[in-house]
Image (cartoon, rainbow, N blue to C red):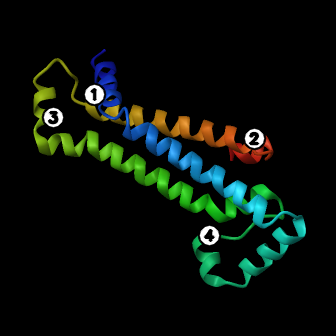
Amino acid sequence: MNTVALIRLILRRDRVWQPLWVLSITLFVVTTVATIRQLLPTAEARLHYANEIVQNPVILLLQGPAYGDGLGAAAAQQRGAATTLFAALASVVLLVKHTRADEERGRRELLGSAAVGRHAPLTAALTVVLAANAVLAVLITVAGVGAGLPMAGSLA
């Protein structure tokens, strides 16, 4: 019961920041697909791009290889690692903000004096982070399908 109250508190405190990072990462993916569609309109152009990547070890190290000549393969190669990194960083910032930062500011002791379980703050923060990442996954999947990419690839 008290974990639910802490979840509501976290959602109220992050009512601007949390939707902003979820939507900005989604927009990052949408603009990448649109840009690749314009810059590499044919399968031959995307295949040439994939062959050029294989010959550049720095890009290959940072972004990985392209697995095919489809639009989704080029988008995943181009921004897959960056999208994952941005989502992970936002998740860590959110989790630290509602666990460690609250402890340093003395809010944790204030919460602990109430009828809240010992693990309720961590459980609430993890629940909110996992829910935000689930919403992000759904939005990226919907954006990929909306851009004409296959459902399985968009979900991956």
Q: Residues within 10 Å of mark 1 (few under 14, many from 20)?
A: some
Residue indicated by mark 2: 145
Residue 63 is marked as 4
Residue indicated by mark 1: 120
Residue indicated by mark 3: 108
Label 4 – label 2 distance at C-alpha? 23 Å
Q: Does dot 1 land on a helix, a strand or a loop?
A: helix
Q: Which numbered mark, 1 or 2, is in the foreground of this view?
A: 2
Q: Would residue 13 be found to the left or right of residue 139 on screen? A: left
Q: Residue at x 80, y 66 (%)?
A: 40
Q: Residues within 10 Å of mark 2 (few under 14, many from 20)?
A: some
Q: Are marks 1 and 3 in contact (CB under 8 Å)?
A: no
Q: Are marks 3 and 4 in contact (CB under 8 Å)?
A: no
Which is nearer the N-term, disc 1 or disc 3? 3
Which is nearer the N-term, disc 1 or disc 2? 1
Going by the numbered disc 4, the residue's amino acid type is Gln
Going by the numbered disc 2, the residue's amino acid type is Val
Q: Does dot 3 land on a helix, a strand or a loop?
A: helix
Q: Residue at x 13, y 20 (%)?
A: 114
Residue 139 is marked as none
